[in-house]
Structures are given as C-alpha cells and as structure tokens.
Image (cartoon, rainbow, N blue to C red):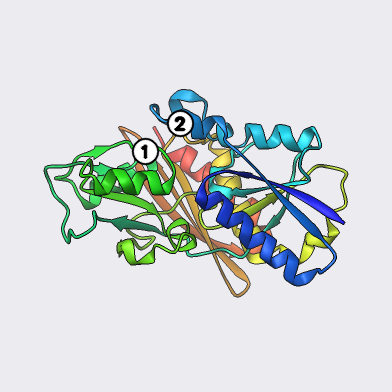
Amino acid sequence: MKIKIGSRESKLAVEQSNIVIREIKEKYSNIDIELVTMKTTGDIILDKTLDKIGGKGLFIKELDRALIDGKTDISIHSLKDMPIDIDDSLPIIAYLKRENPLDVLILPKGISYINIKKPIGSSSKRRVYQLKKLYPEYSFKPIRGNVLTRLEKLDKGEYSALVLAYAGIKRLGLEDRIYKVFSSYEIIPACGQGIIAIQGKKGQDYSYLKFLNDKNSEYEAKCERSFVKELNGGCSLPISAFARIKENNIILKGFYADENNYVIKEVTGNKEDYEKIGINLAKEFKGIIK
C-alpha cells in the first residue's frame, strides 16, 4: 500500500508531516509513504496581512486541489491555519494529540529585554489586542512568512520581539529561543492551536489512520471551532476560543475584541456536549457585543 501526503513546503509544515509519517511507519511496516510538498498562495503573498488577501483558505487551496485531483491521498495541516468552513468533501479525519497550545515571546539573539523603540511583531489581531493590555507602552507591527523567516527578521533588528505559537517553536527544535510562555490568562491562544489535523477525501477508507486520532484533541478542536463559527469569525476578526478537557468536563474560554468591545467569558460543561457548549457561549457573546 502506498499513500501520498500533501504538505506545505515550509520546514515546520514538513516536520509536522514527518510526525505523522513516523507514527504511520511505526504502526505499519507495509505502507509506502511519499511526501508531496507545495507552496500555497498564503506562502507566496507575504507583503499583506491575511485578512487583506482572502484569509486562511489561502494556506490550503493548493493542497485541497491536489486531494480533489487525486495527486495526494491526505493533507497535513496546522489546524489553526485551516478556515472554519471547510469543504464537506474534504473532511478532517484525525486530530493528533495536542502540543502545548500557548503563545510565546521571543527576543532577538543575545538580547534579554524588549526594546521599546522597536515594534513587537505579530500579524494576529487576536494577539495584538491582548498584547496591548500586557504592554500598553509598546508598538506593534505585522509580520508574515514562515517561522524561520520571521526569526531572521527579528535577529536582524527589525522587531524588538515576536509572539509565536509554542507548538511550532518546539516542533522546529527552537525551544531555547523562548523568553516567556504566556498563560491563557494573559493571551488566549488561537482556535485549534497546537493540533495537527489530517484531511482526507470523502468516500475514502481511512480506518487505518483511526489510531492517530486523539479524542480529547478532537473534542477541544470542535468545541473551539463551533464557537468561532457561530460568531462568523475568521482571521479577519479578533476572535478565539480555548478549550481544555478535565476528566469528563470541557472548559471553554471565549474571546472577542474590537474598537468598542473586549470580552472574555469562560464556561464549563460535559465534554460530550462540546459543540453545543461552543455555540451557546458564542450566543452569549452576541448578546454582549454592541
């Protein structure tokens, strides 16, 4: 048996695909795997923020086409980079065990403080609204590109610091660059952050990949995404949700901000009601947001 795995060509995307490949090879000795990498539109257009060029769908469009055309059998994604509304014919078939979902602060090499004369780099409105509460005296500037490109810009002196996802930094073996890990009380992470998602094609038999699905990650992801979907959120709006499972309960913290609102609310419910919990919290937010 042979399977072709579609991935973005960045070092982080390839490493995430390799995590999946290693798991499959450890489980099955009779599967031959080919990694098919490609550059997506979101990787090519780097001089504009995502909300100006079409949103997160630009990171998966080419991968979706490869799946539809049969050039690949599955695609590997960072779940946080996937749009909330995905093609029903290309379902998510597995959610891997979640890595640390939090955000981190990274400083230039050899520097141990945030230089107030230079901006903190982040293209995420979600992050910037929350960072302004933590660092009100600092300025912020968008930054695009893969993780290594961003770190290069940081070390060249273009920024005083960067805020990135812990998961990506760890998967690249760069944990020594982390200056501070933000708690979820300081910065609520992006919806789905830390979860690797496997996307397949409707009608295909993927039962052999069932062992990769982590049920807690699946429940947390679906809870978070149901909240964001109910609020009609995407990368253009500073919306997020962060779910954590504790025993039989799921704890969901929602976030929304704009020029007139800054709302954070937390609810707890039975983990089996993950989707309902996300939708109901979003409806509460709709009643608060003016």
Residue 80 is left or right of residue 124, and the answer is right
Residue extending furthest toward the top = 53
Q: Are marks 1 and 2 in contact (CB under 8 Å)?
A: yes
Mark 2 residue crowding within 10 angstroms, few (<14) / some (14–19) / many (20+): many
Residue 257 is left or right of residue 205, and the answer is left
Along the line of sight, the residue nearer the viewer: 212 or 88: 212
Residue 50: image tag = 2
Residue extending furthest toward the left = 117
Task: Determine the secondary structure under disc 2.
Answer: helix
Q: Mark 1 to mark 2: distance in Å? A: 8 Å
> Tag 2 or tag 1, which sits nearer the N-term?
2
Q: Quadrant of the C terminus?
A: top left
Displayed quadrant of residue 70? top right
Q: Is residue 199 visible?
A: yes
Measured from the top left, where is residue 243 in percent x and y?
53, 59
Measured from the top left, where is residue 20 in percent x and y?
67, 60
Count of numbered marks: 2
Measured from the top left, where is residue 259 in percent x and y?
30, 32
Residue 240 drawn above or below residue 260: below
Displayed quadrant of residue 15? bottom right
Residue drawn where x is 80% and y is 52% of the image:
3
Task: Determine the secondary structure under disc 1.
Answer: loop
Q: Is residue 214 visible?
A: no
Residue 281 drawn above or below residue 32: above
Residue 123: image tag = 1
Residue drawn where x is 53% and y is 44% of the image:
282
Hey, what amino acid is under mark 2? Leu
Residue 16 drawn above or below residue 72: below
Residue drawn where x is 51% and y is 50% of the image:
11
Measured from the top left, where is residue 1 in percent x and y?
87, 57
Hey, what amino acid is under mark 1? Ser
Along the line of sight, the residue nearer the viewer: 47 or 122: 47
